[in-house]
Structure formats: C-alpha cells, structure tokens
Amino acid sequence: MTTDTAVRTTPSARRRRRVRRLSKRDRIVIALMIGVPLLLDLALIWGPAVSTFFLSFTNAHGAAPSKNIGAQNYTYMRTIDPDFWPALRHNVIWLIEFTVLATPLGVLLAVLLDRGIRGSRVYQSIFFLPVMLSLALIGIIWELMYGAQFGLINGVLGKTSPNDAINWLGDPKLNLWAVLVEATWRQAGYVMVLYLAGLKAFDPALREAAQLDGANAWQLFWRVTFPTLRPINNVILVVTVIESLRAFDLVYVTNGGTNGLQLLSAMITQDIVGPANRIGYGSALGVVLLVISLVPITYFLVQQFRKSER
Amino acid sequence: MKGEGHPVRPPPRKGRARFATGAFIMVLAVLWMLPLLWTVFVSLRTESDTNAHGYLSWPRSLTLQNYSNAWTQGQILMHFWNSAKITVPAVIITLFLASCVAFVVARFSFRFNLILLLVFTAGNLLPQQVLLAPLFKIYTSVAVPNWLSDSGQLYDSIAGIVLINVAFQTGFCVFVLSNFMRTIPEELTEAALVDGASVWTQYWRITMPLCRPALAALATLLTTWIYNDFFWALTLMSTGDKLPITSAIKNLQGEYAQNANLLSAGSLIIAVPTLVVYLILQRQFIAGLTLGSTKG
C-alpha cells in the first residue's frame, strides 16, 4: 500500500490528494468511463426494474393509451387468474427440487471427484457438458428422450404404441417433473464446477488432521470441509435460488409454459409479448417475481460486500 | 509442512466403499451422456428405417443426409450469421465498458465506488422477465437511425439485442474484473502516475494488458452465454429471419415438421459452436465461472 514513504497520510487524506492530482482531462475521462456504462445500466436494467412497479398499476395494452387502475391487476392475479397460483407453486417446487436434489447432487459429484477417482477429469468433462448447451437446446434434446413414439425412454419401457405411450411432456401430472430432470441435468454440473473450484482452495492439512483424528468421510465433509467453504456455499446457495427463479427456457420450448408447466417467468412473457399484449398485467406479475428475487440478491450482496469492506 | 515427524497414515478407505463410489460415478456418467448419444444416434438414421423399425432398433443404414437437410431447411447459416452479428459486438463492448468501470472502482477510492459495484452486480442477478414490460415499451417507442436498425426502432433490430445483452452482462464483468484488478499491485499504476501518465494510459497501457487472463476467461464465458441466450431475441424481435440461432430453435421445430431425425441433426449443428468452446476453451470457461464465485 505505502509506496511513497515520504508522505504518510490517512486513507481519506490520501484519497483527496490523489483525486486533486488528476488533471481536468483525466477527470473527464473518469466521468466517461463510469458515466457511459452507468447510463446504460440505469436505462436498460434499473430504470425498467423500477418502472415495472409503476406499470403494474395501469391497464397498459400494446400501444393503446393506458390509465391507472390501482391494484386491480393484483386482485385479478390473486382471485381470478387460473394460472397464477399454479405458477407460483411450480416455482416453489422448482426451488425445492434444486435445493434438495440438483444442487446437493452437484456438491456430491464435486466431493467424490475431488478425491482423485481414476478418470476424474473425464468424469468432470462429462458432467460439465450440459452446462455449455443453451437451455433451449436442452429442451429440444430432451424432447427426443421423452417423445411419445420416438423417445428413448418410452422405447426402453416398451410403450411406444399410440394407445399406451406415456406422454411425459404433455401430461400435466408428469411434465413438471420431466422438465425438472432436464434442469437437474444442467444444474448439477454447474454446481459441481463451482464447488470443485472451492474445494481446490481447501487446505489439505485440515483434511489430513481430521483423518489422523479418525474422522470418516461423512464427518470430514460435514464437520471440516463444508464449514470452511462458507464463501462458496453462499455463492452456490444464491446460484440455486436465482437459477430456479430464472427458469424459463425449458418450459417455454416445451409448451410455452402452459398446461402443468406454468411459471411466473413464462406467464410474464406470454402476457407482454403474446397476442394480448397485456403489459400492465405482465408488469404486476413481474413485480411479484422481482420482489421474490430481491431476497437472494440482497443476501448475496450483503455477503459479498461486507467481506470486501473489511 | 504438516505431518512432519508423524508418518501420515494412508487415509482409511475401505475397498468396498471405494468400489461403490466408482460404480456410482460411472453409472451416473453413462446416464449423463445418454441424451446426447441418443440425439447423435437418431440424427444418423434414415426416416424410412426408423418409420419401419421404430427408433429403438438396430440401424439398417446410417446417413448424414439429415444434417444437410437440417442445414438447408432450417436456414441455419442465416441464423448463425445473426448470432455472430449479435455475439461478437456484444462481447467486445461489454468487456470494454465493464473494464472501464472496474478500473475506476479498483484504482480510485471514491465514495460512490461501493454503490456503483452494488448497482452493477445486482442488475445482473435479476431475472430477465422482470425487465420485459418496460423494455418492450422502450424498444417499441425509441426511434433509431436507419443505418443502425432497419426497423427504425430498437425493437426487432440486431442493435437492440446487442444493447440489452451488453447492459445485462456488464454487471457480472464489472464484479469479476474489479476483483481481478485489485490483485494487480498498485505500485504499477502509481509509478506510471509519477511519470505523468494520464488516467487513460494507466487503464489502456498498464492495467488492461495485465488483465489478459481474466479478459480471455470472460470473453469465453460471455460468448457462450450470449450465443446461448434465448430470451432477448425471442421477446424483442418479431422477424423470424433476423433471429439468432438459439432463439430460432422453437421455429425450427416447425420447419422440421416434427421429424425427429431432422430435429436431432439440427440440434447438434446448433450445439457445434458451444461444443468447440467446450473442447478447446473449457479451462477458460471454467476459469471465468469460478473467477466470479471465488474471490481473489
């Protein structure tokens, strides 16, 4: 930190000194370096995020002039819209599945592969492959697995004739779970890679010490590894929640997010860009999703920046 | 250093447990590959063969015909070109803008630094759909000169999709790059400052070259993410022929008339660019992902 030993200054005095040392041209450059990206971010991200809130109290439709209708959109959402509660429930199921299955599976893979199993690199590459593919493409690839007549799964089960074929993606009792398998296929690999990076930072001395004390693999993970990897655990928690709130592409490719696959994200999209152009109502749904998302986002920011402040 | 003096016992692992772990991973790995292997298998079969014998049957003949049919019927080249026109400028602009912000935040201790970082980082974590309604209104009402957009609006233009991708991805890159730049010794820019170097010189000539590893990793990551983005072009474009390949996927299902053989060949063609990244730049990609998750 202290290169110039000639002047010892407190941080704040130092800061003032440095800023004053900047020429006028430098100050313009700094203003532009921050100003342009900030303007873009405010105009296209935060501006819209805030205006969603205002639009949600209007009946905006397409290009027609809109008027203020108070909380009517929210009342309609709660009491009339047949898709709202199922969508919310599906979002919650998605989140639970990610939390109890997909993410722990990824962590398990990371821990097992980190122990240096033979062919560990190859396995890592295999589990990581789905992370590279777009979710839209994953949806298509799994249609080939689930297809009633041409799908591998029905083929193996011997149920390809039209009268006894299982309609994995069409049956509203099954399709959410079928799509969750697709999502898990990707999420587990994603978590695995993040966790492997965290495990690399784990001091092997701790493991050796625990093993000398006779800890078994289970104790080693829960009592030693997991607690010391707190930073990466936080990241993974946030990734899990955010990814499940962002779920969209898979259901949209499969059936547009209808008939058993309603999600808040898909409803918003259908309302706004669908034929009805219900911008006001779509915004109200957007506000619900926004408010839910702010919980993990705030958590993440507090964790990250409290640390960097120290 | 540890364990000196004590001979470290080999970790007590039971042979059976080790075998079970190996078997578990192997079974899972095979299951993990099945969807793609099946897609490859289906894509190589002729329609007459699968119609006659079903899809789960020993192939009588294999063909590459599905690939060339999928390529022409899906107008894949056109959509690839659209993807390139979006992805390449978006990646370059994002990295440029993000590195500017990151440089200022990392090198100067202004009071607003933390707020700036919060604004950029949080923006990147929002679900895209939350922004859609106002964006849709903005995009359909802002007029844009014709040399930039043939629709005269941001809506339904390549420029508009580039812009939103840049705005959306900048946050993550600011976060990663500012963390990275903080690890560069301050003495380097201090020395330049003493030599009378301007802020721009410190940024462009001194800091940026040192950030090459982080920039390479982020470029790989961004290319994949923007190429893979489905949502923005789906909602902010209306002309099918302008769609990048990922957003055109849903339309392709129609073009291929529910022919599974064509669909699987088409899917694999679409996956090629990301598979190239996977095979050649996997390390960079993972580095980019983990730069963001593990600090310093």
Image: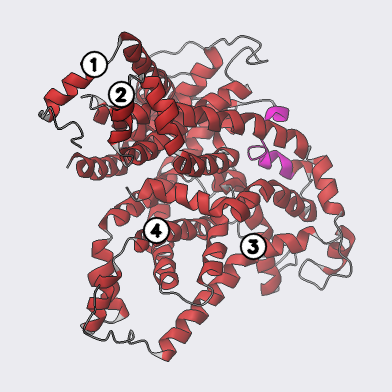
Are dots 4 and 2 on a single chain? Answer: no
Say which chain tag 1 marks. Answer: A
Front residue of A174 and A298: A298
Q: Mark 3 points at which residue?
A: B35
Q: Report the side of A227 relative to B30 (left or right).
A: left
Mark 3 residue type:
Pro
* Residue A285 appears in the figure: no
How far across and how far down the image is residue A60, in percent? 46, 18
Q: Is residue B291 above or below residue A110?
A: above
Q: How many labels does the image show?
A: 4
Q: Inspect the magenta stretch and tell me whether residue B250 lies in it.
A: yes
Between disc 2 and disc 3, the foreground one is: 2
Q: Is B238 one of the magenta-colored residues?
A: no
Query: Which marked residue is nearer to the observer: mark 2 or mark 1?
Result: 2
Q: Where is residue A77 in the image (x, y as percent from the top left)?
A: 39, 34
Residue numbers of the magenta segment:
B240-253
Question: Which chain is mark 4 on?
Answer: A
Using the numbered discs, state the Cα–Cα distance from disc 3 to disc 4 in whole angstroms: 27 Å
Q: Which chain carries label 3?
A: B
Q: Is mark 1 on a helix, strand or loop?
A: helix
Vertical arrangement, residue B203 with respect to residue B262, above or below = above
- Between residue B120 and residue A53, name the one nearer to us: B120
Quickly name the residue at label 4: A197
Q: What residue type is labelled 2?
A: Leu
Q: Which residue is located at x 28 percent, y 53 percent?
A: A231
